[in-house]
Image (cartoon, grey):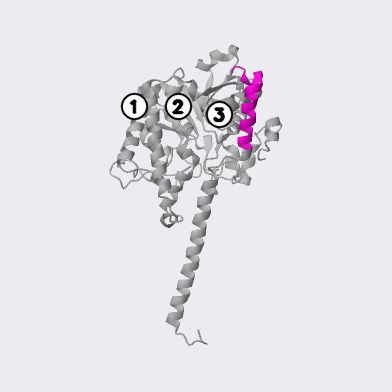
Amino acid sequence: MTSKQQDIKAFAFKTKAMLLGMEQKVQSAKKRELMYWYLASRGVPKSLHCLCLKLAEEYAVNAMARSCLPPPEHVSRLADTSFNHIVLLTDNVLAASVVISSTVENAANPEKLVFHIVTDKKTYSPMHAWFATNTLKSAVVEVKGLHQYDWSQEVNVGVKQMLEIHHLICSHYYNNLKENDLDYGGEHQNFLEALSPSCLSLMNHLRIYIPELFPELNKIVFLDDDVVVQHDISSLWTLDLNGKIVGAVVDSWCGENCCPGRKYKDYLNFSHPVIPSHLDQDSCAWLSGMNIFDLEAWRRSNITSSYHKWLKLSLNSGFTLWQPGVLPPSLLAFQGHVHPIDPLWQVAGLGYRSSSAGGQILEAAAVLHFNGPAKPWLEIGSPEVRSLWSRHVNFSNSFIQKCRVLH
């Protein structure tokens, strides 16, 4: 400045412009890196693809891999309400194996457990082969494909409409997710959920039809395939829901001023007049991933029809009612039907980069939920918490070894 005889004002403006330009480059790099991180979650690891192919081959050539699940002597348990029924909707064989093995390992009475796995047609063979050749000594496992259900025309039409609207919602946000429109750290960061594989997952959306999937059951525990069970959960079936339909973690272990997951305002667009004004946008949204459902109370309610009503309102509003994802329409449909349970039943958010849960909280939690893009079976998964999941993987299994599943 001194040598070129520039005045201080011009120098200040030039310096400020340089700093602003550098800051914009940094923010742009952060935005791209975050988008790539979300995109990485959409891929199926080579090891998981290999595992499914090997198990499908085993199903074709090995009679034991095609044996009945459950064995004929245990079929009566599938509808016996004196047993503890657990439902998984998943197309991930490895993840399902971890959920079930961790639950059985920590159960006080594993012989009381009955697992119901619902999967899609392409995953049915490998899923069946895995649990037919890796039998549990005590618990009962049922594997059923969607192609094996004989639903009514009304349910088929409802499922089709639901999936079409969810696809339109995710496509709307995906197509509008441009770098120039994405404010790093701002509310538009939530649009990245449109990149999440759960946004278009058939198995993820079908949970609203659990009463139709299991017409003979009256109370079930639902587990996502990205959870690990660390303690006995048998007391969930005796939990009094006080007339509510779903038991879920609402309050947080971290105190009054924080939430176990996100707030309502992180999901819903409260500036839209259709969103109920009586909802507190700063209140905590209940956690999915581990829930206890009273299916009898659900059947007496209009939850499923209310869910469809909200989907149609979203369609008619131009997809402006909520952020992309599975949970927002459920928050609205189940409003007033949620019974809060102890916060330590579930600690969530382990699939994101930062989790406020410390070691003692993680150890005390009954269920750990790896919701978020960084699933523990992906390379982008956090090494700090992956071991909590991978210790339940059967690395002695020959297919796991051949496919070199991430340790």
Q: Residue tagged by mark 3? A: 123
Q: Earlier in the sequence, mark 1 or mark 3?
A: 3
Q: Is residue 67 magenta?
A: yes
Mark 2 vs mark 1: give the one in front: 1
Q: CA distance from mark 3 to mark 2?
A: 26 Å
Q: Is residue 5 magenta?
A: no
- Give me the residue at 45% from left, 27% from top: 293
Could you say which disc has been placed on residue 141 in the image? Answer: none
Q: Where is residue 56 shown, x and y percent of the image?
A: 61, 27
Q: Residue tagged by mark 1? A: 302
* Front residue of 65 and 280: 65
Q: Which residues are magenta?
A: 47-68
Q: What's under tag 1, amino acid-wise?
A: Asn
* Front residue of 195 and 359: 195
Q: Where is residue 250 shown, x and y percent of the image?
A: 45, 38
Residue 339 visible at all: yes
Q: Is residue 363 above or below residue 29?
A: above
Q: Earlier in the sequence, mark 3 or mark 2?
A: 3
| Secondary structure character of the magenta stretch overall | helix
- Judged from the image, the secondary structure of the residue bearing numbered disc 2 is strand
Q: What's under tag 3, amino acid-wise?
A: Thr
Q: Where is residue 251 shown, x and y percent of the image?
A: 46, 39
- Give me the residue at 50% from left, 44% from top: 254
Q: Quadrant of residue 279?
A: top left
Could you say which disc has been placed on residue 293 in the image? Answer: 2
- Judged from the image, the secondary structure of the residue bearing numbered disc 1 is loop
- Give me the residue at 47% from left, 68% from top: 21
Q: CA distance from mark 1 to mark 3?
A: 32 Å
